[in-house]
Image: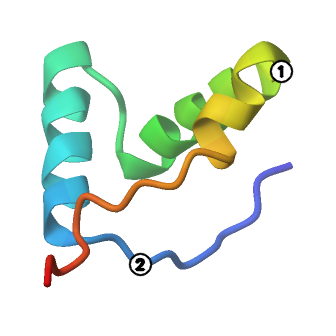
Amino acid sequence: MRQEVTIELHESQNEYLNEMIASYGIKGLGKALRCLVDFSIERKDLEEDIFKTKRCLNCKKD
């Protein structure tokens, strides 16, 4: 059962996801995000790489 949620994305993240949606014929942002979550669930071996590695492509550089 799906549950509706609200998320915040940086502009560049939204643009990237929309490019992937167009490139792969994905039926919307929700589906694209579900694909990413499903991938991370299936690939427990990559869990630390996905969630532990600190990265911020949108942080201000001082």
In the image, is 37 to the left or to the right of 41? left
Q: Nearer the viewer, residue 33 or 13?
A: 13
- Within 10 Å of disc 1 (Cα), the crowding (few <14, some 14-19, many 20+) is few
Q: Is residue 38 above or below residue 31?
A: above
Picture coordinates of residue 50 (x, y %)?
Answer: 60, 37
The residue labelled by disc 2 is 8
Q: Residue furthest front?
A: 62
Query: What colour-coding does the image apply?
Result: rainbow
What amino acid is labelled 1 in the image? Lys
The secondary structure type at the circle numbered 1 is helix
Q: Quadrant of the C terminus?
A: bottom left
Whichever of labels 1 and 2 marks the residue nearer the N terminus, that label is 2
Can residue 47 be seen? yes
Picture coordinates of residue 14 (x, y %)?
Answer: 23, 58
Residue 5, located in which quarter of the rendered image?
A: bottom right
Can residue 38 be seen? no
Picture coordinates of residue 40 (x, y %)?
Answer: 69, 29
Residue depicted at x 25% and y 56%: 13
The residue labelled by disc 1 is 44
